[in-house]
Amino acid sequence: MSSPILNRKYANEITADNDSEHVRIAGWVYEKVDLGGVFSSCARHRRLRRVI
């Protein structure tokens, strides 16, 4: 098993190429949106920047 620190990616580095990968988001849910049965959430991290 590889170290989570070594596999760390910033939100702007996650693209469609990561579609089949599991990712872990650190922060808290700022907003949850229901798009007709598909849920999306916006998270914020400690510097209060918005991550989608």
Image: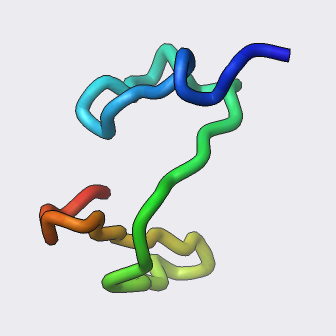
Say which quarter of the image contains residue 16.
top left
Q: Is residue 11 above or below residue 5?
A: below
Say which quarter of the image contains residue 28.
bottom left
Q: Is residue 41 above or below residue 10?
A: below
Point 41% across, 27% down: residue: 9
Q: Is residue 5 above or below residue 34?
A: above
Say which quarter of the image contains residue 37.
bottom right
Q: Position of residue 13 (x, y in %)?
A: 31, 24
Q: Is residue 27 above or below residue 3?
A: below
Residue 38 lies left or right of residue 49; in this view the side is: right
Point 86% across, 16% down: residue: 1
For the C terminus, give its image quadrant: bottom left
Single out the residue that lies furthest toward the right. Answer: 1
Point 52% across, 81% down: residue: 36
Residue 26 lies left or right of residue 24; in this view the side is: left
Residue 22 lies left or right of residue 45; in this view the side is: right
